[in-house]
Image (cartoon, grey):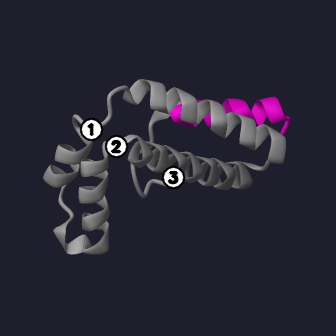
């Protein structure tokens, strides 16, 4: 996988397992590209789902930051998401299940 940003090894292994389950036989280069694509899609799905679960007040604050990315800093994001998501593990699990269903049906 590309070294541009750190990846969660559990998610990487999950993606590799999905490719094996799907029976994909790819060259190393194409497998790396597929892993990058899958990981990016999962991150996007997870992020969207996390924002959806925020309480309305925190969601509004987050959307305000998105309109002016100059306001963006880790402390503000932590304030919004730190206690705004009641069960992050459940959200990750649901997202992995949805991702798996989509990938295995559409690839």
Where residue 3 sits: x, y (%)? 45, 53
Q: How many other residues sit within 10 Å of disc 3, few (<14), some (14-19) or many (≥20)?
A: few
Residue 107 visible in this rendered orientation of the protein: no
Q: CA distance from mark 2 to mark 1?
A: 5 Å
Residue 19 counted in the magenta span? yes
Where residue 21 sits: x, y (%)? 79, 29
* Residue labelled with disc 1: 84
Q: CA distance from mark 1 to mark 3?
A: 18 Å
In the rendered structure, the answer to whether residue 51 lies left or right of residue 70 reads right
Dot 2 and dot 1 residues touching (CB under 8 Å): yes
Which badge, 2 or 1, is on the more N-terminal residue? 2
Report the residue that reaches farthest toward the left. Answer: 75
Q: Which residues are magenta?
A: 11-24
Q: Quadrant of residue 78?
A: top left
Front in this rendered view, residue 56 or 11:
56
Where residue 23 sits: x, y (%)? 85, 35
Which badge, 1 or 3, is on the more N-terminal residue? 3
**Secondary element type, mark 1:** loop
Residue 59 counted in the magenta span? no
* Residue labelled with disc 3: 44
* Residue labelled with disc 2: 54
In the rendered structure, the answer to whether residue 15 lies left or right of residue 9 reads right
**Secondary element type, mark 2:** loop
State which mark lies toward you, 3 or 2.
2
């Amino acid at each position: 996988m590309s070294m541009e940003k750190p990846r969660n090894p559990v998610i990487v292994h999950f993606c590799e397992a999905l490719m094996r389950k799907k029976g994909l036989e790819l060259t190393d280069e194409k497998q790396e590209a597929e892993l990058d694509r899958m990981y990016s899609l999962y991150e996007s799905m997870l992020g969207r789902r996390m924002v959806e679960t925020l309480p309305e007040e925190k969601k509004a604050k987050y959307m305000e930051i998105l309109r002016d990315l100059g306001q963006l800093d880790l402390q503000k994001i932590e304030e919004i998401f730190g206690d705004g998501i009641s069960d992050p593990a459940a959200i990750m699990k649901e997202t992995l299940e949805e991702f798996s269903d989509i990938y295995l049906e559409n690839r």
